[in-house]
Amino acid sequence: MDSLKVVSPFDQSFIEELKYESSQVVEEKLASAYAFYQLREQWLAANDRRKLLIKFKELVKKHKEELIFIAAREGGKPIVDTRVEVERGITGIEAAITHIPLMLGREIPMNLNESSAHRMAYTYREPIGVVFAISAFNHPVNLIIHQVIPAIATGCPVLVKPSTSTPISCLHLVKFLHEAGVPQAMVQTVLCKNEVAEQVVSDSRIAFLSFIGSSKVGWYLRSKLAPGARCALEHGGAAPVIVEQDADLDSCLPSLLKGGFYHAGQVCVSVQRVFVHSKIIKSVSRKLADKADKLHVGEPLDEKTDVGPLISPKEVKRVDDWVQQAVTKGAKLLCGGKALSETCYAPTVLLDPPQDVNVSQYEIFGPVVCLYSYKDRQQAIELANSLPLSFQAAVMTSDINNALDCVKQLNATAVMVNDHTAFRVDWMPFGGRLQSGLGMGGIPESMDDLTFEKMMVIKSPVL
């Protein structure tokens, strides 16, 4: 097939048909991006980049409602949550604008001994080169901003391949960048098949790969990078939460509910494995299941919808297979556990699934939360750390010492205290360890990754 039909994940209704770009067209785009980078006279000064991003931010704000509608329709995230996503995108642009003047370099001390006498030195940053950004479907606006805007902010030309499930949001954002004055060769959308994308990844003109998606694909593509190319990989997790017996359930339960069922669990740091002290497990399981059972599942554009569809019918089938496996092997089904339609799955809470079933071993990426009873917190921590995944984790407790102990021991890049694992703001470091990823995202961290530090040393007898 030479074309891609974009459909609504809720009812599979047709949205738009787009043409896949041939390898020749993609090569032309890569060549223009590389030529732009090679000609230093075309590089944009820091103040020019700031001005362009300020214009872009204003265009996004102007077209905010349009972006919200497009993203909710093609991605399936409830519109109430999509509004938050687009607002976060605007905040991300602001974070990049703010960070540009903080990257202007530093002084290196000299004249500290005889060999450094009569010298002064300072560093400045240069763009690393052409960036290839491969994005995911679950945040079709904010992920594009996180992968593309740091490149523009640092002066790197960028080719962006959106998810084939949600390409329209990306096309609009790139259009707004061009309207803001960003040169055509500096930011280009690449809508191509996977084999063409792999050719781009392995091209020696690519200096940096930004990848968000499955670990299998991400680690494979990393192996295809040319020598010297850098990368940032953002994969999934199976986020653990430890709920101590002194946790404030009035705030804890709504947090677990939101973190577990936000975007139907299709979030890389979604609440998945919740270890609950045995003294409160009955209360927590009953109350969480009751709340989950009352969530409104349906049309993403409906203001009353709490949980939308999964991205495709095959994902509904996969999630159901995993849930049924867990129940067959001994998990207690507290609520949900069934498909509501071809595209929607009921919010599901499982109690004590065995440790060797899929829902305990792998990222579910669906609206399923697993509860496990524990008596010894150390045992819960060991189970939380037992998987080769390490992203964000959480602990719910009123005891600061217990909280600090969990923060210290949990394998995670971030541990939330009395909050869910899916918390994020756009200026904080964000990324996975082990099989969950490589490098740290977040607007400032990404901008630092996309630059080389160059030093100039001046020798003069008058110094």
Image (cartoon, helix red, strand yellow):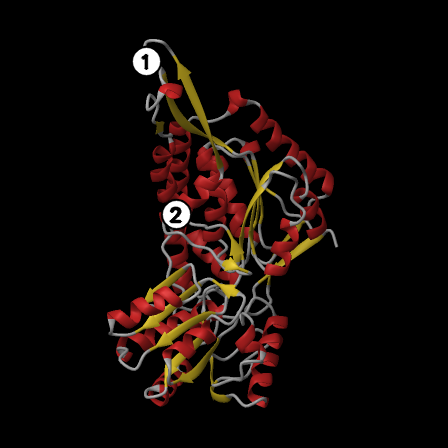
Disc 1: CA contacts within 10 A as few (<14), some (14-19) or many (>=20) = few
The residue drawn where x is 60% and y is 84% is 325
Q: Position of residue 297 (x, y in %)?
A: 46, 76
Q: Position of residue 175 (x, y in %)?
A: 51, 41
Q: Nearer the viewer, residue 373 or 430?
A: 373
Amino acid type, label 1: Leu
Q: Position of residue 2 (x, y in %)?
A: 73, 51
Q: Earlier in the sequence, mark 1 or mark 2?
A: 2
The residue drawn where x is 37% and y is 30% is 104
Q: Can residue 295 be seen here?
A: no
User: Viewer-nearest of labels 1 and 2?
Assistant: 1
How many callouts does the rendering have?
Answer: 2
State which quadrant residue 68 falls in: bottom left
Q: Position of residue 193 (x, y in %)?
A: 69, 51
Disc 2: CA contacts within 10 A as few (<14), some (14-19) or many (>=20) = many
Label 1 to label 2, Cα distance in Å?
A: 43 Å
State which quadrant residue 229 falls in: top right
Label pair 1/2, CB-CB below 8 angstroms: no
The residue drawn where x is 57% and y is 73% is 343
Residue annotated with mark 1: 463
Q: Nearer the viewer, residue 62 or 354?
A: 354
Name the quarter where the N terminus is drawn. bottom right
Q: Can residue 364 be seen here?
A: yes
Q: Is residue 241 above or below residue 209?
A: below
Which type of secondary structure does the marked residue at label 2 adopt? helix
* Residue with the most extreme right position: 1
Residue annotated with mark 2: 92
* Residue with the most extreme front position: 114
Amino acid type, label 2: Gly
Q: Nearer the viewer, residue 14 or 380?
A: 380
Q: Which mark is residue 261?
A: none
